[in-house]
Amino acid sequence: MLCKRKMLEQKIADILKKDIESLGCFIWGIEISGGSFSKHIVIYIDKKDDLITLEDCENVNIQVREVLDNFSELNFNFSLEISSPGIDRKFFNINQLKDYLGETINLSCFLEGKKCKLKGELKEVSDEEISLVSQGQIYQILKGDYLSSNLLGATNE
């Protein structure tokens, strides 16, 4: 079962999807942090074949702010940040990894029942597992054992 924060992130994504797409972008991911009465909402946007510009972020911010100000389930104060995922982008789900085969990633997962962090080259991605080469060894990580990952940009390698 999803926690309340994840459920709220999904609801926000659902209500904003069409508005953001109408501006030529799509939602890469949403993060909510903060306490009960005040939260920080970060919405990462991307484009299929182009870079996100400051103007994209400004336009999405204006549209999203209006929608969220009228969203009854946001019964708390919030700050809003619109951002590109950046060169070291966080992956919010396994399907996002499919476009990054051959790239170097950091990955957190469970291996043999223990939490583990790996750095390696992404080899294969299916709906059920990830194949990663790290320090000369091939790791098969099942979807249920996957925790999180991010791309290593050129400055982080």
Image (cartoon, rainbow, N blue to C red):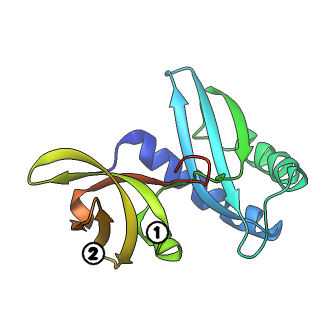
Figure label count = 2
Q: Residues within 10 Å of mark 1 (few under 14, many from 20)?
A: many
Q: Which callout, 2 or 1, points at the residue further toward the start of the chain?
A: 1
Q: Nearer the viewer, residue 59 or 121?
A: 121
Amino acid at the residue labelled 1? Leu
Q: Secondary structure at mark 2?
A: loop
Q: Which residue is mark 2?
A: 128
Which residue is pictured at 76% across the width and 63% down the height? Answer: 19
Q: Which quadrant of the view contains residue 50?
A: bottom right
Q: Which mark is residue 44?
A: none
Q: Position of residue 118 (x, y in %)?
A: 31, 52
Q: Position of residue 36 (x, y in %)?
A: 49, 22
Which residue is pictured at 57% across the width and 49% down the height? Answer: 30
Q: Position of residue 143 (x, y in %)?
A: 27, 66
Q: Nearer the viewer, residue 99 or 63?
A: 99
Q: Which residue is mark 1?
A: 97
Is 86 placed above or below 121 here?
Answer: above
